Amino acid sequence: TQLLEQSPQFLSIQEGENLTVYCNSSSVFSSLQWYRQEPGEGPVLLVTVVTGGEVKKLKRLTFQFGDARKDSSLHITAAQPGDTGLYLCLGLRAGNNRKLIWGLGTSLAVNP
Amino acid sequence: DVKVTQSSRYLVKRTGEKVFLECVQDMDHENMFWYRQDPGLGLRLIYFSYDVKMKEKGDIPEGYSVSREKKERFSLILESASTNQTSMYLCASSLARLRVTEAFFGQGTRLTVV
């Protein structure tokens, strides 16, 4: 059972297009992080969201944490080839059974 | 610049060999993690350590052991390598395990067991 569903699994778009990646769960999370992993490298943290409804912007990337803290989205505006990579979400499950849970990732290819 | 360094980028080992994967971090982090990453399965936690000589099993510890004799070093040991352990292995460190902190990853070791 995948507790943090990430979609889409694969995405191939042209430079300049917009896209949105989703992380969804039936569980509530204390916090959620987004990482990007480039080929041959380890994941690198992009953002951490902790408050329901929170929106954070990082240049052309916009991150949102759902009001109920069960889901999150990553929106990229005017994608560039340098955005190519694997995008991973990591949630810290809330409550007594706290645990770090990874999504399976979204592999993004931005074609010039 | 903070750094997590894994000893090898690529390794090829034979079935039955004992394999050591080394990881060193220079950030004085309490917590260190070993993951394996496989297509379609994401990152799966093998073991983690929250202090020197302390370790806890992750989701897939079978066939693996770990050692943390010094705070900066966390080793993953494959006691008897098998072909189903062919994978990308990622080491990470963080200030805290169950708080909102950044995890820093090494570059990964791609292990092939033949």
Image (cartoon, coloured by chain):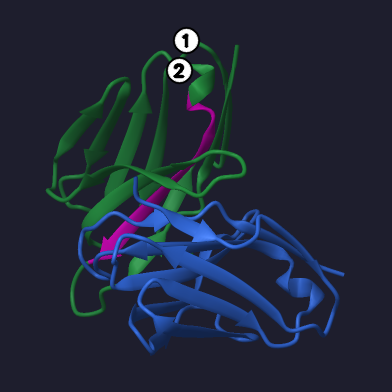
Colour chain B appears in = blue
In the rendered image, residue A88 lying in the magenta stretch gets the answer yes
Give the number of the disc on residue A90: none
Neighbour class for label 1 at 10 Å: few (<14), some, many (≥20)?
A: some
Same subunit: marks 2 and 1: yes
- In the rendered structure, are the residues bearing label 2 and label 1 in contact, judged by CB atoms less than 8 Å apart? yes
Main secondary structure type of the part rendered in magenta: strand
Q: Position of residue A109 (x, y in %)?
A: 59, 27
Chain bearing mark 1: A
Label annotation for residue A16: 1
**Residue beneath disc 2:** A79
At x 53%, y 12%, the residue is A15
Picture coordinates of residue B8 (x, y %)? 65, 60
B56 versus A33 height, above or below: below
Distance between mark 2 and mark 1 Cα atoms: 5 Å
Which chain is rendered green in the image?
A
Residue plotted at (26% across, 79% down): A97
At x 12%, y 48%, the residue is A51
- Chain at numbered mark 2: A
Locate residue A92 relative to residue B60 in the image: left or right: left
Position in image of residue A17 (x %, y %): 47, 13
Q: Earlier in the sequence, mark 2 or mark 1?
A: 1
